[in-house]
Amino acid sequence: MRRSHVVLVAALVVAFAMLLLAGCGGTTTTTTAAETTTTMAAETTTTGMAGPSGDPIVIGAIVSATGPASPLGEPERAALVMLEAEINKVGILGRPIKIVIEDDQSNPTEAVTAVNKLIQQDKVVAILGSSISASTLAIKPITEAAGMPLMALAASNKITEPPIDWTWRAPPRDALAVGAALGYIQNTMKLKKIAVLHDENAYGASGAADIAARAADFGLEIVATESYKTEDTDLTAQLTKIKGATPDAVIVWGTNPGPAVAAKNMKQLGMTQPFVGSHGIANKSFIDLAGDAAEGVIFPAGRLLVPDSFTDPAQKAIVDQFVAAFTAVTGNPPPTFAGHAFGGLTLVLEAINRAGSTEAADIQKALNETKGVITPDGVYNYSPTDHDGLTPDDLTVVMIKDGTWVLAPQ
Amino acid sequence: MTFDQFLQYVFSGVTTGSIYALTALGFTLIYNATDVINFAQGEFVMLGGLTAITLHEVGAPLALAFVGAVAIVAVVGILFQLLAIRPLHSAGILAQIIVTVGASLALRTGAMLIWGREALPLPPFTGDAPIKVSEATILPQTLWVLGLTLVIVVTLQLFYRRTLTGKAVRACSVNPSAARLMGISYSKVVLLSFGMSAAISAAGGVMITPVSFMGYSSGAIIGLKGFAAAIFGGLGNPAGAVFGGLALGILETLAIGALPMSGASGYKDAVAFLILLIVLFVKPQGLFGGRSVEKV
Amino acid sequence: MAAPAFLRRHLAFLAFSIFILSAPLFTGNIYYLSILAFMATRLMITLGLNLLMGQAGQISLGHAAFAGIGAYGSAIMTTRWNMDPWLAMLLSAAFAAAIAGLIGVPTLKLKGHYLAMATLGFGEIVHILLVQLKWLTNGTDGIGGIPSLAIGSIDFGEPQMFHWLVWGVVLIMLRISLNLVDSRVGRSLRALHRAEVAAMSLGVNTSFRKVQVLMVSAVFASIAGSFYVHYVHYVSPVSYTLTFSVILVTTVVIGGLGNVWGAVWGSVLMMLLPEYLKRYNQDYTLLVFGVMLILIMIFLPGGLVSFKTLVAKMRERLGGARTASATGPGPTGGS
């Protein structure tokens, strides 16, 4: 028996050595500033405008492509894959880019392993991710310690609370979306009593906490708060309790399919209160699932959903191009989350381009000086203390009408 | 809680409870035949719903999609037994249980690759105009779920008590070696049990999809609750499984109504599991557990 | 001759110790070290669970909860109450042991799947409390800013130092487990696993012994949770779900139930295999992983540690033609 374990120890050594080798196979060479400049110089002299060449600039991305948050992570990944090909037609700093995408399976532990791999194996110059707040908060200490620029794709307010030397955010944070929803209820709908129904996952709970903290600022009274698990089959019980509290409007904060079940259940219970959702339902799937019950649903979202609402022609041009390319590749218009990935990548690449360097310190400096960069989520102005970059004006309120998105009546 | 609210909670509980019941029934069939707890049971529910959606999409009428999905998933269950469980026959119960864990991972991921990440809808069998009972409302689909659950349970009982095959199945679950001596093919009985178990869970999946949609990951929580319901009612007892499922569903929704504070729904599962634990401590064989407890 | 005898007896343990403790000398790569660190915390839990399942014959589907108690105990006590991390780890482990004792007394009377259900219920309730008791646990946002472990001026936040610390603790636990199995306690445990009535008639207090093992395994899991949070510096409830409990049980059975080394090989496989598979296609990872679990169980029903039986069987089939040369681990042994 004992000897067999010696053999097993040997097997472990072999197994681990193989992992080391497999890892080395995927490793790309480190890009130093010297190399960058030489490559660029070589390019300007020899290749001219003939497309990118040389070692690629490696960007890391951690998305939740599988697991409970996969409806968020999958479109983000699709967008990144598509964008890599698009960008490589021209390149950045004359070099192609390579996006190494890791799946954290909606699990913070996996995200930690992934971020270490990206930094150590793939020698990335910046990291996008993760799709969910828990994973992002788990990797943030690592990127901060390593001096690695991290462009967060998740919404929790905590992500851009100090320390933020190396952390920026692409999507609008919870507070912006909540503010847009509550502001609409107060100013346009002119209602007073609200009920909150939220998913118990991080997305829903974080939004609900923000609503609870700020409802009073908008002159709103919360008369009931109930929650559900993402896969709960029926929400009539929660809604029955909410109905008993007679709210003027029901806020449903969650990602699919929960809010669609809630919309149908409200119809079944004869609840006629307005359904105010979150940007978590900013995708075609919600309309497909809820069907008739989706009609009249109102939610805050980036302007990406209603491309015609872009007043800035530059932003409209970018968004149109993105929508067309994404639709061509995936067959669906891009959901908000795809827009986050597009925005995050744009912000990082724009900073690298402006810095003329892939050195972390240069990217950091350039990101902090980001001014007026346009993405589907809005116009970004970062500063050393503001790593969110967006203002409430970048969000709009959308209504579902005849199975499509229109700007909600003001 | 007014009476109308109470009624509404019960309706809501019965809807989800029926699915727990059918899943629990699936657990029971496999457990009775093999002593295996099938961690892939929820995956059968999910596969049933998603297969029906696809069949309906390619043009099959709902009834045909229902039958087709049930048949296809039954075949999946039989193949699962043949390919993964049968080779382990002599390896012990625990190895077989771990195989079901592997199968649930594989089936769930396979479903994600086939049907994508988003949940998908299926139209209700007969419209979705709610029916009013006093001030509470119930969907026609819920009546379908209840009615079909009843039909399945009664059919199963008739099968067990009136048909020769059914009696053979029961004989095997009581005493496999004696049954074998009587010339009953144990391996055929096990195969049949897997097929029926998968079919019943798949039927539950098809019925609930118009109410709650179906996604690749929907099976996990239903499997968990179905297992709880099966234990609650006394593992191995089909009638107990059905009772356990309905009771669990109603307990969850009543917990929302009965707990006075706001946000009570966050604790609904905790309340249900707490009651389950208390039942287990007081009555370790479950509410209707007839068989010996010491089964491992 | 005493020294060689000692060496032979402890060869596996010594070889494993030397290998694992020297790993940081060969690589300072944080990616590999982080995989090893997570493997270490996983191993701590499965060593305890292996004792419970293999020696006492009790399935627990709630062990994620004990790890969660350790993780959250450490997180809350160090970030909120500024407690010393080591003291926090100790108190969390004591708390986990107390809870294990509390639920063990009524639960361990239950047998087989009923016990599995009871522990599952316990695990679900703990998970729900982690999500819902926001004033204490900060809900799904989780707790961040958890400090690194340190002794005096030695900072275990440094990956290599953490490696030596966490694997040092694993080796101690491994040694405890190996000794326990060989001891009188171990024998009485196995007795109660095989024939409870006979064990009782021999004067073994079966319930007491079982509760003891449950408490030991809860302490192992809790310590693993504490180490995890001091390494990751962040904790959220999504890490402590039923899925994790099921994976823990799977790890033990895949490795080899009842053999202490089974926990080691199970943890190695369950950590490295998905990491490998990911290199090829991340979407298919869990599909292939699930199928591989099935195949391993079919070909090695006794778990990875039973590969020797498989090799022997294959050799038998080959007619013993090449008896001398076949010392390798066989096709599946090295995975």
Image (cartoon, coloured by chain):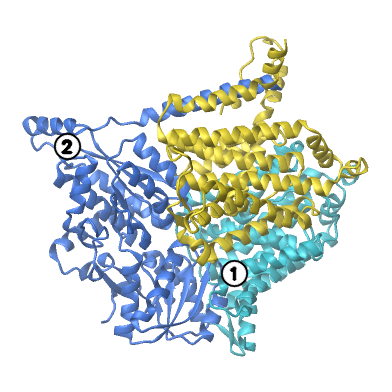
Tag 2: amino acid: Pro
Q: Which residue occupies the extreme bottom position in the image?
A: B134
Q: Residue at x 33, y 63 (%)?
A: A173
Neighbor class of circle 1 (other Cα within 10 Å; few <14, some 14-19, many 20+) is many
Disc 2 residue crowd, few under 14, some 14–19, many 20+, Cα 10 Å: many
Q: Colour of chain A?
A: blue
Residue projecting furthest to the front: C152
Q: Which residue is mark 1?
A: B267
- Image location (x, y in percent) of residue A150: 31, 49
* Quadrant where the C terminus of chain C is found in the figure: top right
Chain ID for label 2?
A
Chain letter, cyan: B
Q: Which residue is mark 2?
A: A52
Q: Residue furthest right?
A: C201
For the residues labelled 1 and 2, say whether their Cβ atoms are less than 8 Å apart: no
Chain depicted in yellow: C
Percent of width and height locating residue B23:
67, 60
